[in-house]
Amino acid sequence: MIDPRPQLDGISMYSPGKPIEEVKREKGLTKIYKMASNENPFGCSPLVEEAIKNEMIEMTRYPETTSPALAAKLAQRLRLKADQLIFGNGSDEIIRLLTRSYINHGDEVVMARVTFPRYQTNVLIEGGVPVQVDMTNGCHDLDGMLAAITNKTKMVFVCNPNNPTGTIVERQALLNFIEQVPSHILLVIDEAYFEYADSDEYLDTRPLLPQYENMVILRTFSKVYGLAALRIGYGMMDREIVHQLQKVKDPFNVNRLASAAAYASLDDESFLEETIAKNREGRNFLLRNFEEMNLYYFQTQTNFIMVDVNRPAKEVYESLLEEGIIVRPGHLMGYPEMIRVTIGQQEENAAFIQKLQAILNRPASNLQNH
Ligand SMILES: Cc1ncc(COP(=O)(O)O)c(C=O)c1O
């Protein structure tokens, strides 16, 4: 056997939400509700289909390496220069490009516990040291994170809104934090769920970019734009950081169909507005029901909710799976009695509540026997 790099010891494979196809096969069910991976249950803009059809003609040609047409259009929207943007095979890839480009063996990277797991994994792959700072009530403890900065700290991640808890950091607290993170430390703010956040306390960090050359903002087309399968996300940052990441990225990391789809999706404001409105309705419906059921939940600003089911999460997750409903059990994320549910279409939300009520009405030890 050939020894892999020792950094890979103890790293486990990413455990994604269970795919629909797998549950159909395993459970012999035909109707499955996937409420596990924070995808867009309302599809994507019809303009995307058209754009993909047109782009198919060019299928035999490699894409351009930096998606320049998309970069120009998005830059204009964001009031940035195109060279301040980089696209990735999902924002997942940009996280990896950042750690690949900046993390040396032994460098410390401060992040919340519990947050998006790819930060930790990518830091470990590079031989860096993830420094996890416990959250308070599902929210980033920004003071704690500042206190965790040492002379070995190279990078800090703030996931805002945070996955898996859905919470945001409040405007003034985040401003103070950004101000206090030393300028030689890369501050990565992951805004994968930016478009869903509607609280007055939510800070759009993009206008701050010119002021903070050490700040990187990540966003994605996988969530509100509904393009998760195509894999395209982007980062906004100082052009010097983009330049470094370009050296590390694969030349054709974003495929033609993804770039064309993302380009087209930017023209459909009404699709975004509808998604956001329906998500809000679904959120209100679920939260109302959780309150009636006396279930505690974290304050969410996203398309998912982390709710306390007062039972072992694994059991509730498995019981829901028997009914064809896929959620994410919290025990895998450090919340042994919580589940994370993605807000779905109304039919899915109603089915989820009905099944959850039935499951929680059973005696605890009996959960899986039905
Ligand atoms: C907080 C956060 N960041 C990044 C990602 C990665 O998204 P993608 O690679 O699909 O752009 C996700 C996906 O769930 C996420 O929740």
Image (tube, rainbow, N blue to C red):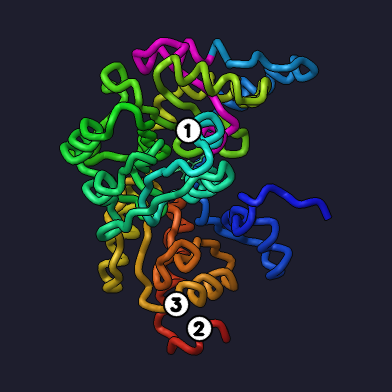
Tell me if mark 3 has few (under 14), some (14-19) or many (20+) residues whose alpha carbon lies within 10 angstroms of its own.
Answer: many
Check disc 2 and report the residue beneath it.
367
Q: Which mark is residue 312?
A: 3
Q: Residue at x 50, y 88 (%)?
A: 366
Magenta residues, start to end:
70-95
The answer to whether residue 273 of the structure is visible from this angle is no
Which numbered disc flags the more N-terminal residue, 2 or 3? 3
Check disc 1 and report the residue beneath it.
220
Q: Nearer the viewer, residue 267 or 178?
A: 178
Location of residue 51 (image quadrant):
top right
Whole-number angstrom distance, CA of label 2 to CA of label 1: 37 Å
Question: What's the residue type where badge 1 is placed?
Answer: Thr
Q: Give the farthest residue toward the right.
A: 1
Mark 1 CB near ligand 1 (8 Å cut): yes
CB contact under 8 Å: marks 2 and 3: no
- Tag 1's secondary structure? strand
Give the percent coordinates (x, y) of residue 46.
Answer: 55, 28
Give the percent coordinates (x, y) of residue 132.
Answer: 38, 53
Give the percent coordinates (x, y) of residue 184.
Answer: 34, 28
Q: Nearer the viewer, residue 216 or 51?
A: 216
The correct choice, above or below, for 108 with respect to 102 in the image is below
- Say if the magenta span includes residue 166: no
Question: What's the residue type where badge 2 is placed?
Answer: Leu
Q: Which of the image's four quarters has the N terminus? A: bottom right
